[in-house]
Image: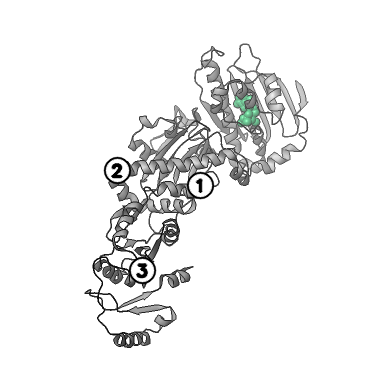
Amino acid sequence: MQKGNIGVSTENIFPIIKKYLYSDHEIFLRELISNAVDATQKLKTFASVGEFKGELGDTTIRVSIDEKKNTITISDRGVGMTAEEIEKYINQLAFSGANDFLEKYKKDANAIIGHFGLGFYSSFMVSKKVEIITRSFRDDAQPVKWSCDGSTEFTIEDAKKEERGTDIILYIDDENKNFVDKNEISKLLKKYCRFLPVEIAFGKKTEWKDGKEVEIDEDNVINETNPLWTRKPADLKDEDYQKFYRDLYPMSDDPLFNIHLNVDYPFNLTGVLYFPKIKSNIEIQKNKIQLYCNQVYVTDSVEGIVPEFLTLLHGVLDSPDIPLNVSRSYLQSDSNVKKISSHITKKVADRLEEIFKADRKIFEEKWDDLKLFIEYGMLTDEKFYDRASKFALLKNTEGKYFTFEEYKEIVKTNQTDKDAQLVYLYSTNKDDQYTFIEAAKAKGYDVLLMDGHFDSHFVNHVEQKFEKTRFVRVDSDVVDKLIPKDEQHEMKLSAEQKENLTSVFSSQVPQLAKSHFLVSFEAMGETDTPVMITQQEFMRRMKEM
Ligand code: ADP
Ligand code: MG
């Protein structure tokens, strides 16, 4: 038996690992299973280049618990380690073997999960002792057992092990006994390992027989090794995307659209994003996108990685190029992350434009649901605004849809005010503003419906973007001053009659004066509405602020 000390200046590192490195103790399982996956993938790479000539055989990774001994064991049939490799990769803390491997096999680099080098040591967050029993895939390798009780001292000795691969045995400490539980481990496996590329088995499958649950001789495989986003879009049907969505979000309505991302230059990114159907009156939920790194679940908080407005989307992003285990503020300044973020925006815009061009009818049918995302994006992201202004739609009070360009043509023909500005009339509530809408229509004007969540901001925003344009609510005083192309309505009341009527109205409805409402009898023409009470657009917006 050999004894030694881990690394050089490690004295103070363990407490740091225990307390600060990962706030969540549960990720020890993710780290150890990731290592087992890496070891298996490495062996497959060696096999493909002829460096390993044996049988791969069953490469299932097995997780088991022993409630009596308080242990959790993770076993793989990957590359295994020799005593020298343990010395190099385990003893020299934070010296990641992954780096060595990456240097040598750059093209397969993306199949390797570990980047950080402290993964294995996260096992000490929950264990009083950790053992590694391992046998390298190389011929005649001597199996070894490494053992460490969480101090900087370890032992290493020859061991007996028939098969290649590695068993990691965790002796769970008293504070973390809750992890030695079937349900708990099942839950964690489902969270972190559900889409890992190597089969992972937790115990055996069970069946109900004579009212009792009995084990059958079949591995209980907990993961799907080829999740949808890793497959080629050409091989997938709409139903596949819908099914995957239902797997991820069992309680949700079917999504509106999906976007399959597949980038390999200048960074790696795959994933599927969905525009969810938002149920009315339910608060909009952010952070439903799951972030993976080579199919290992990392987080569902993607703020800082995708643009703010896309945090409303659902789905999966997978990238080995997003730095993990680092702070949010670092993420936001990382140039790779910035590139990824703007790329995703571009892809989302591309896809929407594609659907718009290919099938305008479908696009219009879904617009009312889509609108929220697109308007939010246009409000918060200049680049997205520029792209989306090609397919963003305006809806009028009759339920017809127009692009910005199309609608401009309609306004040009008659909705111009005295300063020759185009005037876009809009209603924020079809019922409340019914008479105003009808009056405007009677004059031949079109009225937009702007009753959405972000519409009051959106109106302000596009007003600044459009040239020589004003947005005016249909119940404002401006409507009277618009110049109808063909006819000018004649005033039917004398100046004196008007004044008298105005004072009658003001005395009967006192809040009119206070809130700058105006009473007008002008230009109503032959409509059913002889009198209108309007408000200056400016004053109304002032009050809304
Ligand atoms: P990383 O995964 O980032 O390289 P870890 O601390 O998780 O860092 O692991 C350190 C190294 O230990 C790995 O790079 C690998 O060389 C070795 N290792 C860990 N677990 C296994 C395993 N199950 N099989 C073979 N080698 C392993
Ligand atoms: Mg690792």
Is residue 305 shown above or below 118?
below
Alpha-carbon distance for marks 1 and 3? 41 Å
Give how far across and how far down residue 84 sits, in percent. Answer: 70, 19
Give neighbour class at mark 1: few <14, some 14-19, many 20+ (Cα, 10 Å): many
Residue nearest the observer in this picture, 277 or 106 = 106
Image side of residue 493 versus residue 94, left or right: left
Which numbered circle lies on residue 359?
A: 2
Figure label count: 3
Element under label 2? loop
Give how far across and how far down residue 271 sits, in percent. Answer: 46, 37
Amino acid beneath label 3: Lys
Q: Which residue is disc 3 drawn over?
A: 418
The mark nearer the N terminus, 1 or 3, is 1
The mark nearer the N terminus, 2 or 3, is 2
Is residue 37 shown above or below 370?
above
Q: Which residue is disc 1 drawn over?
A: 307
Give how far across and how far down residue 385 sits, in percent. Answer: 44, 50
**What colouring does the structure picture have?**
one colour
Element under label 3? loop
Kindly give the residue lying farthest to the front in the view shown.
419
Label 2 close to label 1 by CB (< 8 Å)? no
Q: Quadrant of ligand 1?
A: top right
Where on the picture, by quarter, is residue 436?
bottom left
Alpha-carbon distance for marks 2 and 3? 39 Å
Asked if one can make out residue 311 in the rendered structure from this viewpoint, the answer is no
Give how far across and how far down residue 27 sits, in percent. Answer: 59, 39
From the image, which quarter does the N terminus lie in? top right
Give neighbour class at mark 3: few <14, some 14-19, many 20+ (Cα, 10 Å): few
Amino acid beneath label 2: Asp
Alpha-carbon distance for marks 2 and 1? 27 Å
Element under label 1? loop
